[in-house]
Image (spheres, rainbow, N blue to C red):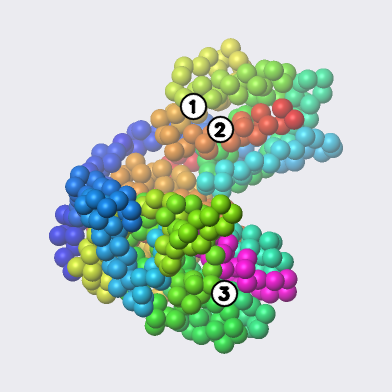
Amino acid sequence: MSFNNLDTLYRQVIMDHYKNPRNKGSVEGDALTVDMNNPTCGDRIQLQLQVEDGVVQNAKFTGEGCSISMSSASMMTQAIKGKKLDDALNMSKAFSDMMLGEDVDTESLDMGDIEALQGVSQFPARIKCATLAWKAMEKGVQE
Amino acid sequence: MDVGAIREQFPILHQEVNGHPLVYLDSSATSQKPRQVIEAVDAFYKENNSNVHRGVHTLGSRATDQYEGAREKVRKFLNAKSTAEVIFTRGTTTSINTVAYSYARANLNAGDEIVITPMEHHSNLIPWQQAAKATGATLKYVSLQNDGTVSLRDVRETVTENTKIVAMSHVSNVLGTINPIKEITEIAHQNGAVMVVDGAQGAPHMKVDVQELDCDFYAFSGHKMCAPTGIGVLYGKQELLEDMEPVEFGGEMIDFVDLYDSTWKELPWKFEGGTPIIAGAVGLGAAIDFLNEVGLDNIAEHEQKLADYTMEKMRTIDGISIYGPEKRAALVTFNLDDVHPHDAATVLDAEGIAVRAGHHCAQPLMKWLDVSATARASFYLYNTEEDADRLVDGLLKTKEYFGDVF
């Protein structure tokens, strides 16, 4: 593997989300709060969701982790904002499929920048980094 | 010590990973296995496999001889007084849990204390948390010096007459700190406490003499010292082990079994319920032979040189933080500014260099260091200065790569 292969993992847009995370911070007012960590590596995220009438009105996160986990959280919050809970869960399913290396139509699901994370599927050791935020979201929605 | 010849003994090292010759720097997680260990396990299954301590048949005798022969090798390796003091377990975690379940729960009461340090691996921390909860004992910590060492003065202040157990790692798996076990054991004994040593990072790398250390228990894993996974050892002083109840009950560990009561075999077998890890023990015996042939003192000297060389080289990298004391075992835990350790480990992997990234099963220590994770390069007898050079080159490339993509 050369650095060219690394570029399939570390796409520019991922680095942008890592360096300038969207929706980082805490929401004001009541919110559903989910804490999740990856016990094998120490990455952790706190996700806050404000849901009204089955629609995600606001989503914010705080946490610590690698470029993949933090950029994934940034992209995820961006993608689910303004979406119905069902759509958010569908996105999560699509994201899991993407991590399994399956072709996923991210455009029709309106998943924003998330396609940039497709390369993670080629780095099995890093898939859990990418899915952490999504798992937190799923847990929050199920609650 | 001829490292080139030693490397020849490790088939796994001679491969390319991601287009580069493998540099394996994760031996603190698990070591690689030399040919003679792999062949000993292979030969056991091909020629002698049978259960131990039962069948009258020839294979049964051969398997028992090999299994008990391995125990004698471990006894010599540790300079224990008797094979009654050498219990085969699944590894360090099981060994420490055996003490925490059997000894601690029987001997601790409310008001008693267990003393450990913040540098402990989870396997020498959580068993004591649980034992404290179960008995009402208090878990106390000896604070660390700024450089990640333990001062004997602090140990003296923390250990009191209420302390019943002092548990400490021989060598920290994160900081590389080598703890003065002999002196700490003395302090424990002066206060009437027993000394439990987590030797997972000690026994593979230096000569251990349990009589000289005078510790009461010493736990280690085979897989970190060239043996297979799944085999480990609990050394314990015979007079303590005699009074301890088994933790696992069933086959192999009994003397007489009645409908409503049973009695146990003598030491060490009363702690080895169920069919033991026979091939693993055979592999551990072969690993001890191998390490003795090279010489533990030679290994320690080689690793010391490598540690000094690596530290000196790594220190020249701009924006690197290295954790732990100056005098250390052959492992370096570090972070690069603005690069998460997972990302660094991924770039190094692309260069064929295997390092560990994460919390290293030491979350309280990560808090003490005020980091969420770190990267660690750990060395063993088969590593060379060239490996250290490749690591440093890889780290420079990592910086360059992340400098570029940002």
Residue B298 coordinates in the image, percent (x, y): 24, 72
- What kind of secondary structure does the magenta stretch mostly adopt? helix
Residue B306 coordinates in the image, percent (x, y): 30, 67
Q: Quadrant of residue B154?
A: bottom right
Give the residues in magenta. B92-116
Residue B357 shows in the view: yes
Residue B81 coordinates in the image, percent (x, y): 36, 78
Q: Secondary structure at mark 1?
A: helix
Between residue B341 and residue A54, name the one nearer to us.
A54
Do labels 2 and 3 touch, CB within 8 Å?
Answer: no
Q: Is residue B251 left or right of residue B373?
A: left
Three-letter code, disc 1: Met
Residue A14 coordinates in the image, percent (x, y): 52, 33
Q: Secondary structure at mark 2?
A: helix
Kindly identify which residue carries mark 3.
Answer: B166
Residue B360 shows in the view: no
First in sequence: mark 1 or mark 2?
A: 1
- Same subunit under labels 1 and 3? no
Which residue is located at x 40 percent, y 77 percent?
A: B210
Q: Which mark is residue A115?
A: none
Residue B114 included in the magenta stretch of the image: yes
Kindly identify which residue carries mark 2.
Answer: A131
Three-letter code, disc 3: Val
Between residue B143 and residue A63, name the one nearer to us.
B143
Task: Check disc 3: other Cα within 10 Å, few if <14, some if 14-19, many if 20+.
Answer: many
